[in-house]
Image: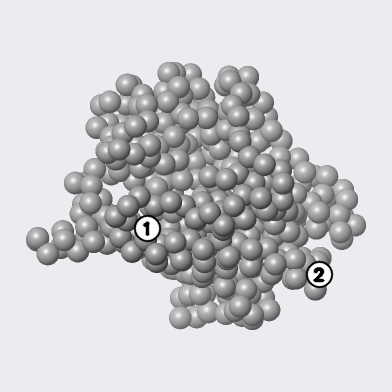
Amino acid sequence: MRRFPPWTFAAAAALLVLAWQSITVAANYGGNWSALFCTGELQSHPPALDSEHTYFFAGSTGYDGQFYHYMAHDPLLRTEISASVDSPRLRYRRILVPALAYALALGRTEWIDRAYRFVILLAMAFGVYCACRYCRESGLAPAWGMLFLLFPALPITVDRMTVDGVVAVFTAAFLLWCRQPSWKLFLILCGAALTRETGLLLRAGYCAWLIWRSQVRTAAVFALSAAPALAWYAYVAQRTPPGPYGGSMVPFSSIWRALLHPWPYPPGTPLVAWVQIADFLALIAVLLAFAMTLTQCLRRPAHPARILAVFFVLMGIIVQRTDFWTNVYGFGRVYAPLLLCLAALAVETRRAILLAPAALMLPRIAIQFVPQFQGIARWLVSK
C-alpha cells in the first residue's frame, strides 16, 4: 500500500463516509438527509425552516448538530433562527463550520444543508490525508492513516454532524505541520479556535513549544492566531445573552461521580449490562490517556504533541461537568485531540500501547450504531 499517495486514501475515506450516510439515511430515515442533524422533537424549532421538512426524533431533545444546523442558516445572528439555539453565546463561538456552509451555499437556504454536509465530508477527507502523510513521513505505510476515522470525534461527527470532528482534523493537520513555523500552520491554528474553544489549546501548545525552544518572537507571532477567534467571541458576546455553564472546578469530581454512579438506563434497554461495561471502559480510557500523557511528557517534554496533550489533560482534570462525563459521545469527541497526540507519539516511537485509550472507547461508540445497522439489515432484507 506504500505506492498509493495519501490523497487516494483521502478520496477513499470520503467515499466511505458518503456511502455510509447514504445507506443509513435511506434505510433508517426514509431518505430524509436532515436526520443526520439529530433534531429533537422536544426542542424548539425555528418556523423559518419549516419548508425544509426536518426529520424529528420523537420524544427526544436531539443533539448538538441541530444547533449548528440552525447557525448555518443564520451565522451572523441577524434573524430569529438563533433563538432556537440552546445556548447561543456558547454555540455561536463555534462558527467556522456553519459559516463555511453558509458561504459555500451563497446564503441560499435550500443549499445550506447540503453545503454543511459537504464541509464535513471534505474535512474528513483532509484529516485522513494529513494522517496518511504523517504515517508516510514517519516510515509507515500511508494506509495506517485511515485509522483516523475511528477516533471518537469522527464517527460521532459522521453520525450527528457535530463540529468536534473538524477540531480533530485541525489537530491532525497541526501534528503534520507543527515541526516548522509556516503560514499553513498559522491558518490551522486560526481555524481550530473558530471551530471550538478547545481549538485555542493548539495555539497554546505550539506557543509553549516555541518558548521552550527560546523562539519567543515566533511564539508572539503565532499567538496572534487567536485574534480572529477572540474578535468573533466579542461579536457574539454583544449579540447574545450570558448563559450558565454548570460544572465544578474540583479536580476529577465529575469523572469519579460518573464511575461510581453509572448512567441509569431506562428499563428494557437491550443488553444494558454490556452497555454499562462499555461506559466504564470508555471512562477508564480517559484516565489511562491522562496517565500516558503525563508519563510521555516526563520522558521527553520538548515535543509539540506532548505539550498539546498536557494542555488537554489539565483541562480534563480541572474542568468538570457531570452530564459531560456520562457518555463517550460527550467526552470522547472533545478529547479526541488528546488521543490523536498519543497516536502521533505511537507512530513516532512504534509503541502501539499508546493507541489503547482510543481503542477502549470504540465498543461504546459501536453500540450506539447498532440500531442503525439493524435498520439497514431489515431494509436490505425487504428489498
Q: Is residue 193 visible?
A: no
Quarter occupied by residue 213: bottom right
Comparing 227 with 198, the one in front is 198
Q: Residue at x 49, y 41 (%)?
A: 97
Image location of residue 28, percent across then percent down:
23, 51
Q: Secondary structure at mark 1?
A: helix
Comparing 299 with 128, the one in front is 299
Q: Secondary structure at mark 2?
A: helix
CA distance for labels 2 and 1:
36 Å
Q: Earlier in the sequence, mark 2 or mark 1?
A: 2
Give the amino acid type for the residue marked by disc 1 in the picture: Gln
Q: Residue at x 67, y 46 (%)?
A: 319
Comparing 147 with 270, the one in front is 270
**Local crowd size for mark 2, using a 10 Å CA cut-off: few (<14), some (14–19), many (≥20):** few
Image location of residue 125, percent across then percent down:
46, 58
Looking at the image, residue 311 sits to the left or right of residue 168; the answer is: right
Query: Disc 1 designates what residue?
Result: 368
Looking at the image, residue 374 sits to the left or right of residue 64; the answer is: left
Image location of residue 312, percent across then percent down:
68, 54
Q: Which mark is residue 383?
A: none
Q: Residue at x 41, y 46 (%)?
A: 161
Looking at the image, residue 340 sits to the left or right of residue 306; the answer is: left
Image location of residue 62, percent across then percent down:
38, 39
Task: Choose mark 2 or mark 1, whichever is in front.
Answer: 1
Query: Disc 2 designates what residue?
Result: 298
**Local crowd size for mark 1, using a 10 Å CA cut-off: few (<14), some (14–19), many (≥20):** some
The residue lying furthest to the left in this view is: 383
Quarter occupied by residue 244: top right
Give the amino acid type for the residue marked by disc 2 in the picture: Leu
